Amino acid sequence: MSVLGYTGYALNQSPDSKNEIHGDRIAKDYGFQGGLVPGVTLTAYLAQPAIQAWGEDWLETGTAHIAVRAPIYDKENFRVEITHQNETQYTAELINSSDKVCATAEVALDKGPCIAPVMRNDPIAEADYQPPEASSEWFEQLRIRGCYAFRYHWQQDHRMAKYFEDIEQMPELLRSSDRQSSKSAMARPGFANMSFILGCANWIFGGNAAMNPWVHLETKSKNYQAIAPATRVVVEMQVLDDFSKKGHQFCDVNVVIFDEQTGCCLAETFQRAIYRLRGF
């Protein structure tokens, strides 16, 4: 089946996020036109052709390498163009209304043998935990001693449940059905989309170090199991590196999502982000 590009209008799912780069006021202070559509949402746009073409297979074995180059804003029209493809992989670009490439993707099916990560049973943060401010010193401590784990709950009223204003623009696999009968041909599974899956990596990152604003730049992800509605997950994180480049302060982390009930690995993500922007 061919992988197809498409057009759409971006949705900022997090204008009231604790990371105020997604809100107009702070984003404009940093020189942007307005609040940034989350990087995890741009990933969902670039992964949608994989779900349309390969369905549940991709949600259970797929990989994606996404690099964000420039912002996309709420309600901005964009297009996803497939630049190369074969039976099991494609490359794509997300292009904004000014014909600027804002993100790139390498997406593939990966049905080869692999060993899924195993839960370390990191301590889970208390609901009222307030982390120290992000710094090279704090990330080095986290790298050595380990991070707190966090719990999240995938459900169809989650704020990341849709990445288009009109949910009908999303693949049926990602849309839930009001019909509960499994015998219904109209039943929809409502699996978690990539903005939730990679969102877990954002939330645990921000849960272990206080930072505002910060910018999601790049992810490499691997799916191990489609995440069904009402799944409660435990997310664990490791700090890999902290470095400066062009005046920005970066951090690399590895994040793994587990089914809280079964302990099975659901997805794994490498993430790179700027946690302190140049000049601030």
Image (cartoon, rainbow, N blue to C red):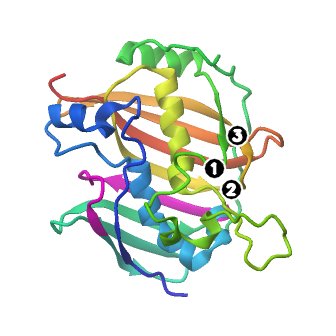
Q: Which residues are magenta?
A: 60-78
Residue of label 2: 224
Specify the quadrant of the image occupied by residue 186: bottom right
Q: Magenta segment: does it hold 109? A: no
- Name the residue carrying label 1: 267
Mark 3–mark 1 distance (CA, rounded to whole Å): 11 Å
Give left or right: position of 143 versus 252: right
Q: With respect to residue 260, does 110 lie above or below? A: below
Labels 2 & 1 near each other (Cβ < 8 A) = yes
Callout 3: few (<14), some (14-19), or many (20+) C-alpha neighbours within 10 Å?
Answer: many
Q: Earlier in the sequence, mark 3 or mark 1?
A: 3
The spot of residue 114 in percent (x, y) is 69, 57
Foreground mark, 3 or 2? 3
Residue hosting label 3: 233
Q: Mark 1: which secondary structure?
A: strand
Rendered residue at 62%/65% (across/down)? 175
